[in-house]
Amino acid sequence: MKLSESVKPITYFKAHSAEVLDHLNQDGNALVITQNGEAKAVIMGIREYERLKDTIALMQLLAQSERSLREGRGKTLDEGFEELWKKIDHEEKKE
């Protein structure tokens, strides 16, 4: 969708809300709502919102992991696998 098609005044949204919501849920694009010529809100379908939230959570997890590595709290791949195998062996011995 072109940006010019994804910006609508609030009066348009009020008059066509059901149609707009159907369209948002079908194509996954967001709609910028303006009031008095200024952008005031963004409306998007629920699936797109959930994807956005998942992406943000993943990026936060990545940033946290990078911070941990910089602070020396990380492990090498070999250390991680060694720890994992020890846990697996320990669980198998319990059974």
Image: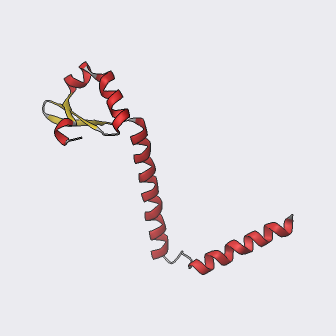
Residue 84 appears in which quarter of the rendering? Answer: bottom right
Query: For this view, does 37 lie left or right of residue 71?
Result: left
Q: Quadrant of the C terminus?
A: bottom right
Q: Which of 16 and 71 is in front in this view?
A: 16
Residue under the image location 79 percent in, 70 percent down = 90
Give the number of marks.
Answer: 0
Residue under the image location 30 percent in, 39 percent down = 30
Residue 37 appears in which quarter of the rendering? Answer: top left
Query: For this view, does 23 lie left or right of residue 7?
Result: right
Residue under the image location 20 percent in, 41 percent down = 2
Residue 11 appears in which quarter of the rendering? Answer: top left
83 above or below 23? below
Extreme-top residue of the structure: 15
Extreme-left residue of the structure: 37
Residue under the image location 43 percent in, 46 percent down = 51
Q: In which quarter of the image is the N terminus?
A: top left
Q: Position of residue 80 (x, y in %)?
A: 62, 75
Q: Which of 62 and 1 is in front in this view?
A: 1
